[in-house]
């Protein structure tokens, strides 16, 4: 069983990419809707939330966890790996996606949450393998709320999105990494403001690098279980715009007193 987690519906973009790549398994998804957004939280807070999520996955029988959240990949991957790697194999997004830029010679843009940008995790991971690569990071924290609350059509959302895209255009970026799993949903809106930026989903790069592992462990059957820490109905409504959620969305047992 593979666990995927995020602060909310964002990680469903990773689950979707996995399914679209033809990978079958038993999937358990956890959206930490009580604590969304992660991008404005401290490292200690995120560590405490994600430790509970790992325990929950292990209890449910998952042997593999995909961190479908850039913010926690940036801030707490190492701590989770040190504590849980004997019980569950953990795949972080950024660390698996960054090596794909090893031969890149143009400026790469990164749009991400406040915490991810502050950590400079993308810049550090890319430059580990390609020291000369120029990386420009920009915080786009409000995109998370726009997706969680379905505010895509509000004028203020559109103005905010436009301003963020203009920044990458002015910086001359032709490739921009969607450094938060909520952001792939907004690509059609981004494209209204730019025709020549390629938006790169790190989930695709992660899958490319671990596809053979995922295929070799597959039983050939697929099932889904969805859990949240608050408001299952809102999760189902927002999430269903991007992923076909036929199953019930449940409140995770460890949160029930
Ligand atoms: N979707 C998450 C990420 O990839 C977290 C967004 C948030 O909750 O701020 O970073």
Image: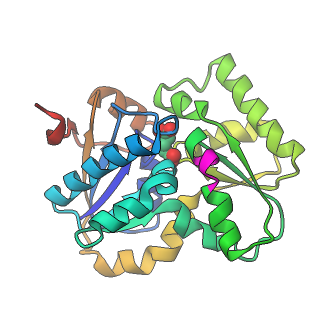
Give the quadrant of the N terminus: bottom left
In the displayed structure image, the side of residue 135 where residue 10 appears, left or right: left
Q: Position of residue 12 (x, y in %)?
A: 42, 48
Q: Residue at x 28, y 30 (%)?
A: 230
Q: Position of residue 130 (x, y in %)?
A: 73, 74
Q: In terms of image quadrants, where is residue 183? A: top right
Q: Position of residue 5 (x, y in %)?
A: 36, 50
Looking at the image, residue 45 lies above or below residue 98: above
Q: Residue at x 62, y 66 (%)?
A: 125
Q: Position of residue 9 (x, y in %)?
A: 42, 40
Q: Residue furthest top?
A: 155
Q: Residue furthest left?
A: 257
Looking at the image, residue 61 lies above or below residue 71: below
The answer to whether residue 247 is magenta is: no
Q: In terms of image quadrants, where is residue 138? A: top right
Q: Residue at x 66, y 40 (%)?
A: 188
Say whether residue 64 is visible: no
Looking at the image, residue 208 lies above or below residue 176: below
Say whether residue 213 is visible: yes
What secondary structure do most residues of the magenta stretch adopt?
Answer: helix
Give the quadrant of the C terminus: top left
In the displayed structure image, the side of residue 244 where residue 225 appears, left or right: left
Magenta residues span 116-120
Camera-nearest residue between 243 and 149: 149
């Amino acid at each position: 069983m593979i666990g995927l987690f995020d602060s909310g519906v964002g990680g469903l973009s990773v689950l979707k990419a996995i399914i679209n790549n033809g990978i079958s398994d038993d999937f358990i998804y956890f959206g930490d809707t009580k604590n969304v957004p992660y991008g404005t939280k401290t490292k200690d807070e995120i560590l405490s939330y994600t430790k509970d999520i790992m325990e929950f996955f292990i209890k449910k029988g998952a042997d593999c966890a995909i961190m479908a959240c850039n913010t926690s990949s940036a801030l707490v991957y190492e701590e989770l790996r040190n504590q849980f790697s004997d019980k569950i194999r953990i795949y972080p997004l950024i660390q698996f996606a960054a090596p794909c830029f090893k031969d890149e010679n143009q400026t790469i843009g990164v749009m991400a949450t406040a915490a991810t940008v502050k950590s400079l995790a993308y810049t550090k991971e890319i430059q580990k393998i390609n020291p000369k690569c120029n990386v420009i990071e920009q915080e786009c924290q409000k995109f998370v709320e726009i997706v969680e609350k379905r505010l895509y059509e509000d004028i203020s959302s559109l103005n905010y999105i436009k301003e963020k895209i203009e920044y990458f255009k002015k910086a001359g970026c032709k490739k921009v990494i969607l450094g938060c799993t909520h952001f792939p949903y907004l690509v059609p809106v981004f494209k209204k403001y730019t025709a020549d930026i390629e938006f790169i989903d790190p989930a695709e790069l992660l899958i490319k690098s671990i596809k053979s592992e995922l295929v070799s462990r597959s039983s050939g059957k697929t099932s889904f279980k969805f859990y949240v820490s608050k408001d299952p109905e809102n999760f189902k409504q927002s999430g269903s715009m991007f992923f076909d959620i036929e199953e019930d969305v449940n409140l995770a047992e460890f949160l029930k007193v």
